[in-house]
């Protein structure tokens, strides 16, 4: 396919720091290759801004191949833009047409404070993980080979699907309630399905849910928006599994 | 204490929302079964059946307990819903300048709070229209009927008689002379001799309320009830199947079935509720 060049108008959220008052700024960008990725387009904009002696737009990115969970951006009203099953770095400018106006906003959540422009602080996810998203392993040098533990294929597949979560926060960003339950559901499920995760199962779900609530995320009302916008296709089944695990843990745990 | 973990948590709030919501769905079925008697039977027979049913609902101990459980469920559902909405509003202090929620979720699922509020407004109006008249004001007259034939015992035709509990009892005329009413009880005037117990005529109150010949505001009332049932349908469309997900029931085999039953429930139950005032309005 021959590459085309398009001219676009960008409406981007600019905010100096977490305390400053932000606002939408409008930029015109000419000669954007439809072969370029969305992030390359932003690089092009930043080059233009630097040449004009202006402050470039800050945005998160790292691997640029859809695996690290670093890129974010709420593009034209959708988390990670208009395509499904992709992260922003996998979004290409061929998804847009000449003359388009594109809104670019940061993830909006009380638990994800803005650091600068489009960069948000997602360490709330790290703290949830630290509250229980791990398994204890024997480090005496006699660690059991994971392959020696029989696991049904079906369970292994489900655990793997849950583990595909890259923690990008699109679920929180797109949820009308700013709920993190798809993320926490995936992290709980990934271990709950495996024998290695059974040891801490009760503590894990109680502690991770408590941390999630303390971080100020909203509450799930099962709209299903997260499942649609998740770049890794994490299923709502994981939220149901977390609800089951939490219900039984909270009713039966000794503490 | 582990119970407090459940009560304090966000998932706990969802669980209570789901349990009370599903309980209120069973209430809807019971209420509908009673209401359908308004249109399934006609004339004096329908009037008797409905007023007997209303008496049973007001006096049976089990139903009484059930009604308090229902009030509690409504209260918990409302308070929990408000708590959830406040928590969810707080979770996004700055809103998006441009958002396209229609591309990833149903409008019903995003409007549960406003739909629920509208249902609560309907509930308050509905109870003021009927429950308040019946239970608090006790302003509903007793069920009486006209005897069309000449009866040697009763005298002239067209005597107005009470419809009373014990069948076969000598008809008691409502003439205001010998019999006086104390609540639903009928006493011989000047004594404390109770001769029978009558029924409150809730049937006539309902029929007149929606009757275009008896109530000038009947069209407005019918439209209000109709719109409220559409609102209820939307609330159930999301609420029914959402409750199962909140309780952790999501299964490749059962979830499609739950969604079908939930959709059918959300359409059929409000539809049957809604046709009752419409039929009364058209026929009376």
Image (cartoon, rainbow, N blue to C red):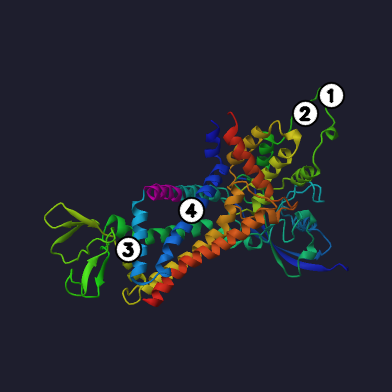
Q: Chain of mark 2?
A: A
Q: CA distance from mark 1 to mark 3?
A: 79 Å
Q: Which residue is mark 1?
A: A142
Which element carries disc 4, helix, strand or loop? helix
Q: Which residues are magenta?
A: B61-74
Q: CA distance from mark 2 to mark 3?
A: 70 Å
Q: Are marks 1 and 2 on the same chain?
A: yes
Q: Are marks 4 and 3 in contact (CB under 8 Å)?
A: no
At x 48% / y 66%, what residue is drawn?
A: B272
**Which residue is more in the foreground, B102 or A202?**
A202
- Relative side of B196 to A94, left or right: left
Q: Are marks 2 and 4 on the same chain?
A: no
Q: Is residue A100 magenta?
A: no
Q: CA distance from mark 1 to mark 2?
A: 10 Å
Q: Earlier in the sequence, mark 4 or mark 3?
A: 4
Q: Which residue is mark 3?
A: B202
Q: Are marks 1 and 3 in contact (CB under 8 Å)?
A: no
Tell me if residue B163 comes above or below residue A220 in the rendering. Answer: below
Q: CA distance from mark 4 to mark 3?
A: 23 Å
x then y, percent, for residue A22: 61, 53
Q: Chain of mark 4?
A: B
């Amino acid at each position: 396919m021959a590459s085309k060049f398009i001219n676009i108008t960008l409406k981007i959220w600019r905010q100096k720091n977490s305390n400053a008052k932000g606002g939408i700024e409008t930029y015109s960008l000419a000669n954007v290759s439809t072969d370029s990725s969305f992030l390359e387009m932003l690089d092009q904009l930043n080059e233009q801004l630097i040449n004009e002696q202006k402050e470039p737009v800050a945005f998160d990115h790292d691997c640029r191949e859809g695996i690290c969970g670093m890129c974010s951006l709420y593009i034209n009203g959708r988390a990670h833009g208009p395509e499904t099953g992709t992260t922003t770095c996998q979004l290409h400018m061929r998804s847009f047409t000449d003359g388009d106006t594109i809104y670019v906003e940061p993830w909006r959540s009380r638990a994800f404070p803005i650091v600068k422009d489009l960069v948000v602080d997602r360490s709330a996810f790290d703290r949830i993980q630290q509250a229980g998203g791990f398994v204890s392993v024997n480090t005496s040098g006699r660690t059991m080979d994971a392959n020696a533990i029989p696991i049904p294929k079906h369970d292994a597949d489900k655990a793997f699907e849950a583990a595909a979560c890259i923690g990008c926060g699109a679920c929180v960003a797109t949820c009308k309630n700013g709920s993190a339950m798809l993320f926490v559901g995936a992290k709980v499920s990934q271990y709950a399905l495996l024998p290695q995760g059974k040891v801490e199962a009760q503590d894990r779900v109680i502690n991770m849910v408590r941390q999630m609530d303390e971080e100020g995320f909203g509450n799930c009302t099962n709209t299903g928006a997260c499942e649609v916008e998740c770049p890794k296709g994490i299923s709502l089944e994981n939220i149901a599994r977390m609800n089951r695990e939490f219900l039984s843990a909270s009713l039966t745990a000794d503490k | 204490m582990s119970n407090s973990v459940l009560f304090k948590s966000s998932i706990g709030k969802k669980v209570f929302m789901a349990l009370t919501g599903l309980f209120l769905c069973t209430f809807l079925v019971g209420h509908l079964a009673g209401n359908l008697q308004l249109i399934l039977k006609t004339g004096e027979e329908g009037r008797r059946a409905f007023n007997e049913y209303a008496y049973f609902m007001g006096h049976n101990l089990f139903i009484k307990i059930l009604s308090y459980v229902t009030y509690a469920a409504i209260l918990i559902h409302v308070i929990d819903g408000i708590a959830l909405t406040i928590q969810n509003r707080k979770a996004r202090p700055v809103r998006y300048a441009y958002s396209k929620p229609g591309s990833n979720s149903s409008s019903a699922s995003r409007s549960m709070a406003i739909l629920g509020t509208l249902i609560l407004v309907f509930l308050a109006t509905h109870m003021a229209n009927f429950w308040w008249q019946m239970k608090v004001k006790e302003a509903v007259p007793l069920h009486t009927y006209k005897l069309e034939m000449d009866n040697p015992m009763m005298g002239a035709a067209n005597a107005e008689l009470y419809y009373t509990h014990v069948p076969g009892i000598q008809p008691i005329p409502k003439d205001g002379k010998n019999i006086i009413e104390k609540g639903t009880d009928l006493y011989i005037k000047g004594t404390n001799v109770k001769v029978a117990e009558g029924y409150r005529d809730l049937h006539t109150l309902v029929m007149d309320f929606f009757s275009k010949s008896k109530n000038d505001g009947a069209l407005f009332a019918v439209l209000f009830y109709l719109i409220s049932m559409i609102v209820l349908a939307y609330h159930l469309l999301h609420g029914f199947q959402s409750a199962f997900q909140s309780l952790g029931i999501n299964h490749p085999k059962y979830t499609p079935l739950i969604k079908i039953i939930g959709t059918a429930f959300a359409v059929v139950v409000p539809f049957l509720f809604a046709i009752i005032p419409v039929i009364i309005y058209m026929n009376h």
